[in-house]
Image: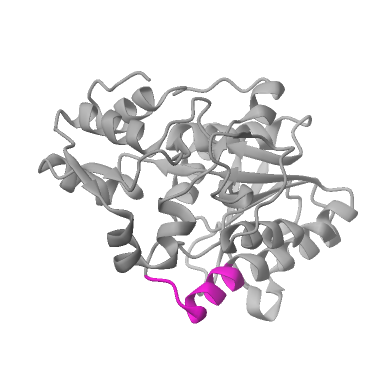
Amino acid sequence: MKVVIAGSSGLIGTALVAALRRDGHEVARLVRRRAAAPDEFVWDPARAELDGRALRDADAVVNLCGASIGRRRWNGHYKQELRDSRITPTDVLADKVADAGVPVLVNASGVHYYGGDTGDRVVDETSPAGTSFLATLCRDWEAATKPAVAAGVRTVLLRSAVVLSRNGGMLDALRPLYSLGLGGRLGSGRQYAPWISLDDEIGAIVFALTNESVSGPVNSVGPAPVTNAEFNRALGKALHRPTPLVVPAFALRAVIGEFADEAVLSGPRAIPTALEEAGYTFRHPTIGAALASVIGRGGDDR
């Protein structure tokens, strides 16, 4: 296949490029600076401009664009950046994919599509969208793919959980604290903490690219949901460190503001029904297996 990737320099994009090339696929990367390699093609989403050569003979496009939701404290300006960095590129790519007749579009989304107030209720791809800021963002992000859907492009909406990786991502921030014995649950710990290993995130994307039965919403989450308290215990065990602390909800709200309630003190109990029904086999089906794969030690096999 020839696969065109937007957002190829991030954690997931870098790993995806490597995996596709290992499997013998051709990769073209969309960049917003001057092209510096034969596989790079310039695009400017704000101007709706894209080098037409990028999509020539392309079999699929993967869109991973989006500013990090936890990079800094939210305010009105940053929340608009979160929207613009996702919806505008998706609008452009969906139009270009439709015009070029590319058969497949895999577009990133987030598991917080369902909102964070689902409690113990299990949610899958048939569940409705929530009403929080992140849920509305994901809903509008997915809606931006409509030109591709209308043109008959097989469109996959990848609702991803937090990705657990050996290098980068959330674990980079948590590992030093836990290694010092400063780990602990957040708030009550009863909220669900959706997760997926980097290997399975990449595996799910490649599976979606290569299986014609996969389309529409796809939860890219581990198949065994855990609460924050369970995640905390599993990470402590994987690092062989105690996790005695409790970070009160009010303290989190004071430090990180609205993001605390949207994505830290709440989370959906999401399951990957679409992937499993399509035949995907998880490399790391439990939080213990996922943590062991990225930390390199035995973990709690909950």
Q: Is residue 161 within the magenta segment?
A: no
Tell me the chief SS of the magenta region.
Answer: helix
User: Between residues 26 and 60, which one lies in front from this camera angle?
Assistant: 60
Q: Is residue 77 within the magenta segment?
A: yes
* Residue 36 location (% of width, % of height): 47, 67
Q: Quadrant of the C terminus?
A: top left
Q: Residue at x 51, y 55 (%)?
A: 8
Q: Residue at x 38, y 71 (%)?
A: 73
Q: Is residue 292 visible?
A: yes
Q: Quadrant of the N terminus?
A: top right
Q: Is residue 24 visible?
A: no
118 shown above or below 294: below
Judge from the rendering whether residue 94 lies leftward or rightward of residue 170; answer left or right: right
* Magenta residues (range): 73-85
* Residue 20 location (% of width, % of height): 55, 38
Q: Residue at x 62, y 38 (%)?
A: 219
161 shown above or below 34: above
Judge from the rendering whether residue 233 lies leftward or rightward of residue 124; answer left or right: left
Judge from the rendering whether residue 187 lies leftward or rightward of residue 82; answer left or right: left
* Residue 218 location (% of width, % of height): 67, 38
* Residue 115 location (% of width, % of height): 59, 51
Q: Residue at x 57, y 50 (%)?
A: 112
46 shown above or below 133: below
- Residue furthest right in the image: 151
Color scheme of the displayed model: one colour
User: Between residues 185 and 11, which one lies in front from this camera angle?
Assistant: 185
